[in-house]
Image (cartoon, helix red, strand yellow):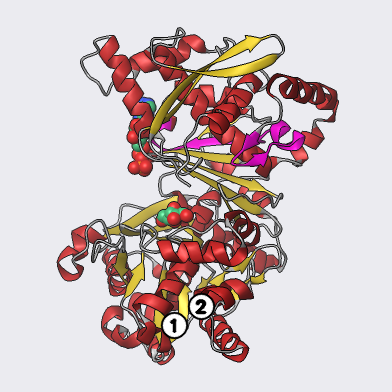
Amino acid sequence: MSETDFSSSKSLFLGFDLSTQQLKIIVTNEDLKALKTYNVEFDSQFKEKYKVYKGVITPGDDGEIVSPVAMWLDAIDFLMDKMLKDKFPFDKVIGISGSGQQHGSVYWSEEADKLLKNLDPKKDLSEQLQKAFSWEMSPNWQDHSTIPEANAFHKAVGGKENLAKITGSRAHLRFTGLQIRKFVTRSHQKEYAHTSRISLVSSFVTSILLGKIDDIEQSDGCGMNLYDIEKSQYDDELLAVAAGVHTTLDHPESKQYQQDKIEELKQKLGKIKPITYESSGPISNYFTEKYGFSSKCKIYSFTGDNLATILSLPLQPNDCLISLGTSTTVLLITQNYNPSSQYHLFDHPTMPKHYMGMICYSNGSVAREKIRDEVNKKYEVKDHTNWSKFDEILEQSEGKPFDDKLGIYFPIGEIVPQAPAQTIRAVLSKDSEQYKVKKCKLDTDGFTVDDDALAIVESQTLSCRLRSGPMLSKSSVSQKDSKDTKEYEEIYDKVNKKFGKLYTDGKEQTRDSLLARPNKCYYVGGASNNQNIINKMGSILGPVEGNYKVEIPNACALGGAYKASWSHECETQNKHIPYDEYIKKLFDVNQELESFKVVDQWIEYFDGVGMLAKMEEELLVSDD
Ligand code: ADP
Ligand code: XUL
């Protein structure tokens, strides 16, 4: 029997999260209160049947990583059975939304439509949908078997910056367009001919819930390298690459043949569903009859997991969500479409004409742990996993001026900037007006292990600052602060005098990009439990409206549930309610949004900004 009391809630919403290793469903009510989470881990439940390890199968040594689609169907039935046993009141659910791991694709067969329409509640999904797929697998986002396809995409449009300009990202091995090209031209030619539709993981789940194939949701659709974000339509040239009929890459037999193949792929992908609060339809009979959902329960588009994560918080334009897990991920909201090959821009899933920026670093916590271990070795701290000494060093630096020492600590190859594993330490030498970065070694130029502890947190944060600047620039915030304009101008002139022009990832940092400040910064993930780390980050990033530490377990499932309740509210009022306004009431109910004060050193750290930019420009060896 459930210990959660659902009886005091009038209506319930479900937020799904179909991720690599598990399916989660979170239950919220009309007050945005999270009541309960159900989950099933694929390895613990389906290892025998599907031979998965950490939710995926690695069939060979060519980098291919896939998940069995039938396992996901079993997971849906399994979890709903579990809820049924828990006496979950399915009849109270009035809206469902959610998320799926991004970029993964599902290939439907010609029989899919009919099979989906006629699902029998007495049978399981996987049993009935065996013939609904032209390929029984879905490429996972960790797949890295598409290097030739990445080259093809870049070649077709004249390089990675151009591709990023069109689609919001350069070619990434996991992106759907590359996976489709591999499917069409290399791995599954025959199956492609029998593919009726292609879904993303997000639209795959809604298709199951609706009992009909659903269109791809716009913001998740930006993770394909096929969609022209500014024009809000598929790019025909990129579709030609995916379909294996690009003029210079594939030399198709005729223009007509090429056009036919582009059209064919367009049909298989279906329409991109624009950002909307409108539902895709009611839940299908299979679920009403089998589990007791009301036929009034509506399905709202699912989106990608990172996109759903930003929906779990009252994020406004220029707010940043910094996730300090194994890797570091920065998610931010902007109205500024300023793409770069080094980060991602996606359409925002609920705010039209807004974008979600995403910067993914591979060197996050693990790099900090290495320095922590060295610090503990020096001070003979027995437990090498203890953070106290590392913390003490950070704490002592609080409010002190920047000490002109930075480091690039990449124990593993880095994504941004794209560079092989390496460590570089440097000091800033100030001869006259011109500042110079001087490479140094540990225990030379006064650079100690203690300095490493401070320098890694500073450098990682400055990298976030340098790369979020172009996305935040021309922001309402920097314009709002008009009283500071003169001061800002002087800062910019000073930086220019000291360092000359600054470049990040090959692009000049403009006045706007250097002077842009975030609005609010939110910190999540393991290392956000370390107050000294996030204090330092906050003082460098300098958000104008403060820093917040957040604990949101199941953020993407929660974001999905909130999207469902927001959509329902908009439908009820028959108008678009700005998402950030709707979700603001979260501030009243969510005690986990804990604000903290820092010493604002945003201006002081301009020397650090200049120094890191120069280090990256002059010292880094790139893999590219
Ligand atoms: P993921 O979800 O990516 O697996 P988590 O969000 O759980 O990871 O974060 C794990 C990381 O958090 C660990 O690698 C660890 O270094 C870091 N971490 C946890 N507690 C602290 C702390 N007190 N100080 C610094 N880092 C911490
Ligand atoms: C984002 C990405 C991963 C997956 C994880 O681009 O590939 O974060 O979405 O599920």
Give yes or no for contact between labels 2 and 1 (Cβ–Cβ under 8 Å): no
Residue 228, located in which quarter of the rendered image?
Answer: bottom right
The residues bearing labels 2 and 1 have C-alpha atoms spaced at a distance of 37 Å
Which residues are drawn in magenta?
Answer: 503-527
Query: Which residue in the protein does label 1 denote?
Result: 211
| Residue 562 point in image, percent of width and height | 54, 56
Residue 74, located in which quarter of the rendered image?
Answer: bottom left
| Residue 380 point in image, percent of width and height | 24, 10
The amino acid type found where label 1 is placed reads: Gly
> Viewer-proximal residue, 452 or 565?
452
The amino acid type found where label 2 is placed reads: Asp
Query: Which residue in the protein does label 2 denote?
Result: 250
Dot 2 crowding, Cα within 10 Å, few <14, some 14–19, many 20+: some
Residue 484 in magenta stretch = no
Residue drawn 62% across and 26% down?
609
- Secondary structure under tag 1 reads loop
Residue 499 horizontal side relative to residue 39, left or right: right
Dot 1 crowding, Cα within 10 Å, few <14, some 14–19, many 20+: many
| Residue 461 point in image, percent of width and height | 53, 29
| Residue 276 point in image, percent of width and height | 64, 67
Residue drawn 41% across and 36% down?
363
Residue 517 in magenta stretch = yes
